[in-house]
Amino acid sequence: MIKSLLTSVSETLLQRNEPATVELPIFPLGSVLFPGGTMALKIFETRYMDMAKACLKNAQPFGIALIEQGNEVGTPASPHHIGTIARIDDWDMPDLGVLRVTVKGESRFKIIEQRTEKNGLIIGIVEIVAADTVSDGVKPESTSGKASDQLQACAQLLKMVMSQSGQSAEEVQFADASWVSFRVTELLPFSSAIKQKMLELTDADMRLEVLFRFLRDQQLIRV
């Protein structure tokens, strides 16, 4: 039910964005990277090793997209059309032939064309997806009480989880509906397919509402 609702809403909202086209190497994965999120990657295939080295050398990003068909290793997989730009934040090579990197998610993108290089690396011609629309939950006078209450409830849960897990409080944005909804989505045990639909939503208030309903039904928040 959640997946079907998110599919119809996300497809409608994505049509409203103004495109800016760029070329981007694509790394299909079995996980979803969200804007503002971090992900640790273990890179050992030649195509991705070369990609990562080029990105480090030229201070350029690449794209991470959830696999729609195929596998992470071997024959190039088919990625979903919506993914997230990833920029390498840290790296290490503890073993010969294995590169470990930590990436930070930036803007979302939509693949409009793609080609596969001889080494198996997918190159996408992508449109940058505009930032979330939001009613501005930090200003009660410009948003409904419902949206503000949902933001506060989700932010409170996020604060508690971060405190208990000892996560760094740097760059927190608890008043930002988009940031909070992405961080809560990362924490919850949704399937990759559901997380992909949450990524595709471009209305932060809608994403918060979906999360709020789930958390309330699971009795993870008090209302």
Image (cartoon, rainbow, N blue to C red):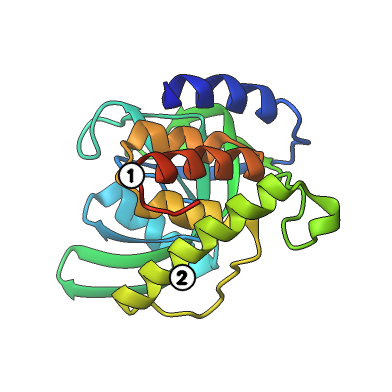
Q: Which residue is pictured at 67% across the width and 47% down the height?
A: 147
> Helix or strand or loop: what does disc 1 sit on?
loop
Q: Position of residue 41 (x, y in %)?
A: 29, 59
Could you give the CA–CA distance between mark 2 and mark 1, rounded to whole angstroms? Answer: 24 Å
Label 2: how many residues lie within 10 Å, few (<14), some (14-19) or many (20+)? Answer: some
> What's the residue type where badge 2 is placed?
Lys
Mark before the other along the chain sequence, 2 or 1: 1
Q: Which residue is pictured at 33% across the width and 37% down the height?
A: 192
In this picture, is 47 found above or below 4?
Answer: below
In this picture, is 14 found above or below 59?
Answer: above
Q: Position of residue 129 (x, y in %)?
A: 66, 40
In this picture, is 117 found above or below 101?
Answer: above
- Choose between 137 and 192: the one closer to the eye: 137
User: Which residue is farthest left?
Assistant: 95
Q: Position of residue 57 (x, y in %)?
A: 48, 69
Q: Which residue is pictured at 76% across the width and 54% down the height?
A: 136
Q: Nearer the viewer, mark 2 or mark 1?
A: 2
The disc placed on residue 181 is: none
Q: Which of the 4 quarters of the picture holds residue 70?
A: top left
> Helix or strand or loop: what does disc 2 sit on?
helix
Label 1: how many residues lie within 10 Å, few (<14), some (14-19) or many (20+)? Answer: some
> What's the residue type where badge 1 is placed?
Ser
- Choose between 34 and 219: the one closer to the eye: 219
Instruction: Provide the residue designation for mark 1.
Output: 31
Instruction: Provide the residue designation for mark 2.
Output: 159
Q: Is residue 39 left or right of residue 96?
A: right
- Choose between 221 and 63: the one closer to the eye: 221
Residue 118 in view of the camera: no
Q: Position of residue 132 (x, y in %)?
A: 68, 46
Q: Which residue is pictured at 57% across the width and 19% down the height?
A: 8
Q: Which of the 4 quarters of the picture holds residue 11?
A: top right
